[in-house]
Amino acid sequence: MSYFKRYIKGILSLALVLALVTGCEDYQDLDVEPVDTGDADFSSYVAVGNSLTAGFQSNALYEDAQKYSFPNLLARQLQIENFEQPLISNPGIGDPGRIELTNLESSTTQYNTNQGDPINTGIGQPYNNLGVPGIKVDAYLNAPDDNPFYPLVVNEGNPQNPLPNIHAAVQELQPTVVSFWLGNNDILTYVTSGGLREFTNPSNFQTQYVSAITQIQNLESDPTVITANIPSVASIPFATTVGPQFQAQIEGNQQVPGLVVQKTFYQENQQIGASENREPASLIEKANLDDPSQALVLLTARDYLPYVGVSANPQAPSYDEAAVTAILNYWRGYIVNAGVATEEEVANYSQSDIEDTLRQMTIGQYQQTFGAAEAQTFAANYDGFDFDQPFGLSSKNPFPNQFVLGANEISITNTVTGIFNSVIASQGDVNFDVNSFFDQVIQDGQYTDPNSNVTLQPTIGSLFSLDGIHPSNRAHAALTNELIETLNSATNGNIDKINVSKIPEGIPVAN
Amino acid sequence: MRRLFATICLVLLCSGSAFASGFSIYEASVRANGVLGAFSAYADDASTIFYNPAGLGGLEGINVTGGATVIAPRSTFRNLSPLAPTGQKTVMEKQEFLVPNFYGSYQITDNLTAGIGVNAPFGLGTKWPDDWVGRGSSIETSIETIFVTPSVGYEFSDTGIGNIRVGAGLRIAAHGKVKLSRAVTNFSPEGTFALDGDLKEPAFGFNAGLQYEPTDKVTFGFTYRSKVTTEFEGDATFDNLSVGFPSSAQGGAEITLPSSYVLAVNVEPVKGLRTELDYVWWGWSSYDELAIEFDQPIPALGGSTIVNERNYKDAWQLRFGAEYTELPVEGLTVRGGIAYDENPIRDRYVDPTLPDSDRWLFSGGLSYQVTDYLAVDASYIFIRAKQRKVTNTHEGGIDGVYTTYANLPGLGFTLNL
């Protein structure tokens, strides 16, 4: 009997021990370790910026991309609850729409002109992500006119009733940390227009930037202000993708001496110590398309590069009716945009009508820039346009200006970016050096995620979305990690980084 | 004693898991459930075909037993990935699975008994909401198998050193289904990939066992079950995915169901009380990847195969059970059990298709002899898995915390003719 008792006791003790070992963890509460933000208080975060902050990708602002905006990812790593974003349903809002992949193998794309709707309205307070696509620095204190995104982003939950400026939203939120990433568009509009549109005057930039930062620093909440700078133009595939591709295509073809590009005229810009050429068209040598300091062929040139060498003369061996129609239509649009004729009028223009109009417009531009006397001399020696000459290979049938940045324009861009970046570096509590980050990526040829074996290339579809300008989902994660690194060293914190491989690529496709 | 009950109640109240570790199902008979499968050295009914075919050698006359176990797993997930707020909770959809079993044996000669068993030794079923944070890893997964096991057992009695029984059988995977679906998040809009496959053809393995009974109070058992390589084939669909995917395709996958062995000892310390301890080893390392092969190249995959690394490791279970027959109520037998079950999945590969973790199992059961021939059997198992936190999962995996428990009631009958 004592054997039996011992045995039963043994079994029961075993059961008891096992039960105790199993314990009784409270399954309702998850012990999430608090974030270590060091000396700083990052409990309430507001992101000020443009499309890069908004999570705009592939030429549109849409939910699937906004979810991976760097401010949203940073807020998650900071364990901030209710970081609100002005989400727009897919395929989002863009002009003319989101770029979508139509074929994986050939990487062909098209615009999806359907537009999305706001889906996170009525929250009764401003959004924490105040990234407004397209805005420049001055928009922080002065609401921009005609920006379709502004009323959607800068409101208290009702897009019909936008706030007077972005600062009003920031003031209402009283954050403890603000990221301020503006200034890109102050130079980018110049870049994306092939130098046709102006960049912000650097001294105005300084005034606007400093007053914006001062306003934020004067908030009662006394936030930590993170200022992010502007990456160089040579780091965006929008400017670096198609030039080298085209160069490779014409390599070894002795019939194609190089790309000839139409250029407009700039007076010497005293402010930045740079000047533009006075020639209406300049020969860009073949090899130069590979050299990002000599010529940057913009992504928008993609549709016209295949037509290079085409003649409008039906007798010429290089005649191509479809190409000629496309080229003439391009110039018709150019004339309409310049306000010289209406759409109806140019529709009936013959080839020689277009040639004559463009000649007159060029002489007119010259006069506007350098004065009537100089223009007269110029007009006497100027041959004008002749579409019978090979497209893009003759100064009489040049490749359109708006698709290429020439050496002077590149140098101007770099100078201006440098000035802007030195202003940015002098402002805020923490500087986020996005420029160096992208420089390093370009130098290494790739970004390697320290948390996984994922590598990202500075190309469209990898670090960049389909528009070649805006970062992809994973690039936003990489940027977030860089920002976290910057914050950790600035505040002695230890915020966890993101495993970039966990972020879905989310490439837009046409279904 | 009171403290013991209090503790057990507390444990039962606050805890839990689904199935056995990996996707094996050890609940192969209602009587065995009562002792948590600590049955390989005892095996006094026809379900011994599963637990140890050597046990057939001791069965007399005609023995039929059958029943079903309901498996009701419950899991929740708390997000630790950058894809959603930290701690965001998702509850796995509630599902109940009916796992049937049936065995029959016939004594051919004094020492030789043959039998056949039908049960489901492997299975899996998880279903998460369509829009949940881990949808890129899994939305729905299910694996069903039915095995048919014709077996024979032989008893060598009067050997001078006690009874020795041997047995062996064929394990035939006769029926099987796999179903899996998950979101494809690489694109916007997202799509869904699903595969709905059936077992292509019966797959074969074997089992073999040994029982040694040096005295009538002690029995040792050993069972070996071979691995069975199954091939599944069926329709693959790609919903809302027109760029880079075909509209439909045929897909196939090979799943190796692991081998296992059992070392068991059964002791009768006092009359009417049989206690048993079983050590079960599982060769899960054979499940290194789940490769789905399509009948055509799929541009978005850059090939015609999707490979999901699994890299399971071998695992073990320790099962203890007790049965008591000397009760005041005639014809009543009660059972109880406790077991520990080590999971085979490395942290890096834990995903919501099978939110596995080490677990404790607790059981109770009873049989009541209704007539001389017929007994009804009932069992109840409660499984509580340790909370599992995974923070460095493989690419495509999702980081977070899983908590799982399961209830497994069973009901069956046993006929002795």
Image (cartoon, coloured by chain):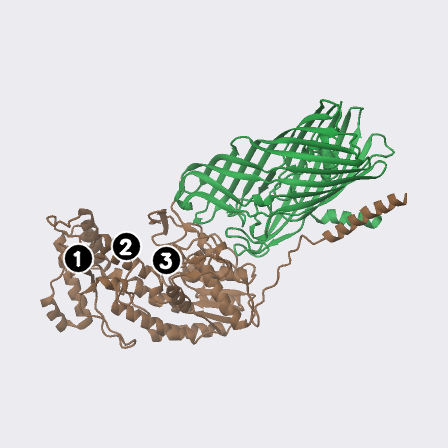
Chain colours: A brown, B green
Secondary element type, mark 3: loop
Whether labels 2 and 3 share one chain: yes
Q: Which residue is mark 1?
A: A254
Q: Position of residue A306 (x, y in %)?
A: 23, 52
Whether labels 1 and 2 share one chain: yes
Task: State the CA–CA distance, disc 3 to disc 1.
Answer: 29 Å
The relative height of residue A367 versus residue B374 in the rendered view (above or below) is: below
Q: Position of residue A63 (x, y in %)?
A: 45, 53
Q: Amino acid at mark 2?
A: Arg
Chain ID at mark 2 = A
Q: Is residue B216 left or right of residue A309?
A: right
Q: Which residue is mark 3?
A: A459
Secondary element type, mark 2: helix
- Cβ atoms at labels 2 and 3 below 8 Å apart: no
Q: Looking at the image, which residue is at 49% across and 63% down?
A: A481
Q: Amino acid at mark 3?
A: Thr
- Rendered image quadrant of residue A204: bottom left
Q: Is residue A23 visible?
A: no
From this viewpoint, which residue is outermost toward the front?
B160
Q: Position of residue A113 (x, y in %)?
A: 35, 49
Q: Quick one: label 2, few (<14), some, or many (20+) residues within 10 Å? A: some
Chain ID at mark 3 = A
Q: Which residue is mark 2?
A: A302
Q: Looking at the image, which residue is at 33% across and 59% down?
A: A238
The relative height of residue A503 versus residue B172 in the rendered view (above or below) is: below
Task: State the CA–CA distance, disc 2 to disc 3.
Answer: 15 Å
Q: Position of residue B85 (x, y in %)?
A: 55, 56
Q: Quick one: label 1, few (<14), some, or many (20+) residues within 10 Å? A: few
Query: Which of the labelled discs sits on residue A394, or is there none?
Result: none
